[in-house]
Image: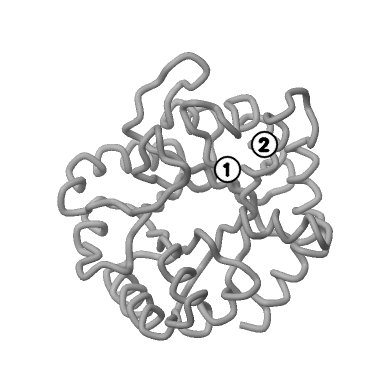
Amino acid sequence: MTVLSVNVNKIAVLRNSRGGGEPDVLRAATTCLEAGAHGITVHPRPDARHIRADDVLALAGLTRSRGVEFNLEGNPFAPPRPGYPGFLALCEAARPAQATLVPDGDGQLTSDHGFDFARDRDRLRPLVAQLHGLGCRVSLFADAHRDDAGIEHAAATGADRIELYTGPFAEAMAAGTGQAMLARFAAVARHASSAGLGVNAGHDLSQSNLAAFLRAVPGVLEVSIGHALVSEALYDGLAPTVQSYLAILRAA
């Protein structure tokens, strides 16, 4: 079964908008895990606009104590600054089970593209090796909607997996034109598997499009879902929403 990692960034956005400690990121993550989620994802950014370095360490302790996956996302090329020690330094301190490398810039509202693997392969290779040395499985954020996903170059970095950036798929599904996009994603997933890469997926996946994605795209090992899940949880509750996603995964 595809596993569910819940991204709790949005909980931190709410907390930081008011200051103080509510809503509590650790409590929200605990609720997700107790509802059956298989892991927790966070993507700390250098400006600390949501998840902070102290959250990373606290969540690392929580997931380690429960024996579940902690997936830490970030741009390995973003330089450290006050309050943000850098992605590799965070990985060294937290030792996540999975490190997902994402090429987002400081000013991006959210991640919206994968790596250019032909261009970035040689820069990524030593970083992948460093993360392996920390005991992390390494996943690389990848486009599937472009003509050349660069899968062979991604495999040449030594990474374990790619994470398919599913934003364009979600947009196509909302517009009623999802079938052609699904075929493209399925082809890239097959190519990745044949190159020895596992396949994860994330970004704008929701209860309305997840089942269709999993039916069409083979071998998806993990989905990371945050924005839609937290939005849906405002209406239905956090634990029931997690359980609804798990039911979709089981059925798919």
Where, by quadrant of the figure, is residue 38 drawn?
bottom right
Q: Position of residue 82 (x, y in %)?
A: 48, 14
Q: Is residue 64 above or below residue 221?
A: above
Question: In which quadrant is the N terminus drawn?
Answer: bottom right
- What is the spatial separation of the Cα atoms under label 1 and label 2, in whole angstroms? 10 Å
Type of amino acid at the residue the image marks with label 1: Val
Which type of secondary structure does the marked residue at label 1 adopt? strand
In what element is the residue under mark 2?
A: helix
Residue visible at 44% across and 79% down? 217
| Residue nearest the viewer, comparing 210 with 134 | 210
Q: Which residue is mark 2?
A: 12
Residues at circles 1 and 2 in contact by the CB criterion of under 8 Å: yes
* Place of residue 48 in the rendered image (x, y in percent of width and height, measured from the top left): 55, 27
- x and y percent of residue 88 in the render? 41, 31
Q: Residue at x 67, y 77 (%)?
A: 248
Q: Look at label 2 and name its amino acid.
A: Ala
Residue in view at x 63 percent, y 25 percent: 54
Q: Classify the position of the C terminus by image quarter.
A: bottom right
Q: Residue furthest top?
A: 82
- Residue 35 higher or lower than 184, as above or below: above
Q: Nearer the viewer, residue 68 or 246?
A: 246
Q: Is residue 224 left or right of residue 163?
A: right
Mark carried by residue 156: none
- The part of the image, by quadrant, that contains residue 23 is top right
Q: Where 133 sits versus 252, above or below?
A: above
Q: Quadrant of residue 181?
A: bottom left
Q: Residue at label 1?
A: 42
Q: Position of residue 135 (x, y in %)?
A: 46, 41
